[in-house]
Amino acid sequence: AQSVSQHNHHVILSEAASLELGCNYSYGGTVNLFWYVQYPGQHLQLLLKYFSGDPLVKGIKGFEAEFIKSKFSFNLRKPSVQWSDTAEYFCAVNPRQPGTYKYIFGTGTRLKVLA
Amino acid sequence: GAVVSQHPSWVICKSGTSVKIECRSLDFQATTMFWYRQFPKQSLMLMATSNEGSKATYEQGVEKDKFLINHASLTLSTLTVTSAHPEDSSFYICSASTLPGLAGGSSYNEQFFGPGTRLTVL
């Protein structure tokens, strides 16, 4: 079965520290890849997405992600986190299968940034 | 563009009653809509996929008689939680997608998410 793994369930960082959140998926075909952020009490917001082309994708708020096809990974990075980045982060994968638009979400990573 | 709204944003109801949640695509035609539920501190779990004008496809373990989905137009889908019980309390999120190339849509399979509806069943 197709699945998405986010290995870090809880991450605590100090402000200005660098961030990398892992995301791995199990699907051998072509995929679309997404990272979403959910701030406390708020709805999902799209951080960045990858459909094709340059595997290094830049998103909003200084986030970027790199698609490494050989590793089935799409890790999220930010060089210097801020207190306001405290939120839950979800990786999502859309296997490009004809007739389906399903997203498979990872279990999420809860990030806490200490001021 | 590609805005999805949900109504209501939160609802409290008594056990045994039915609750209807609306999901609307405001500026594009949503050929496909998805319903998710999110329990506290957990990820989004897909409940069902609905295509305009046809029956919804439910994920394994989701009771189709309890969670009625209607997608009667290209801009509106509804989820009705019938005979709600406290264990149905959750955050329900819809998303909408359109065929690549249609006005307002993405070139690829992209879902646009609504803000969610928090259901509390007493």
Image (spheres, coloured by chain):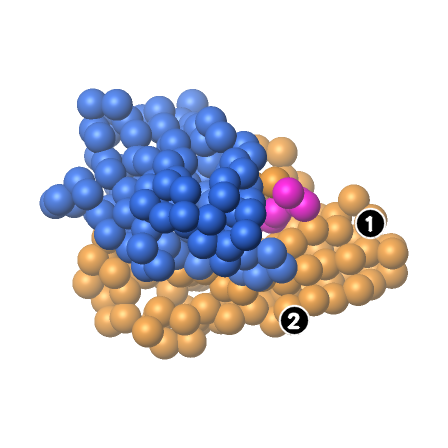
Chain colours: A blue, B orange
Closer to the camera, B74 or B100? B100
Q: Which residue is mark 2?
A: B8
Residue ID at (40%, 60%): B112
Residue type at tag 1: His
Label 2 secondary element? loop
Q: Is residue B66 above or below residue B61?
A: below
Residue type at tag 2: Pro
Label 1 secondary element? loop
Q: Is residue A36 above or below residue A71?
A: below
Residue ID at (20%, 58%): B107
Boundaries of the magenta span: B35-41
Same chain under badges 1 and 2? The reply is yes
Q: Say whether disc 1 or disc 2 marks the residue closer to the N-terminus.
A: 2
Q: Which residue is mark 1?
A: B85
Q: Is residue B120 above or below residue A50?
A: below
Between circles 1 and 2, the one closer to the viewer is 2
| Residue B36 on the magenta segment | yes
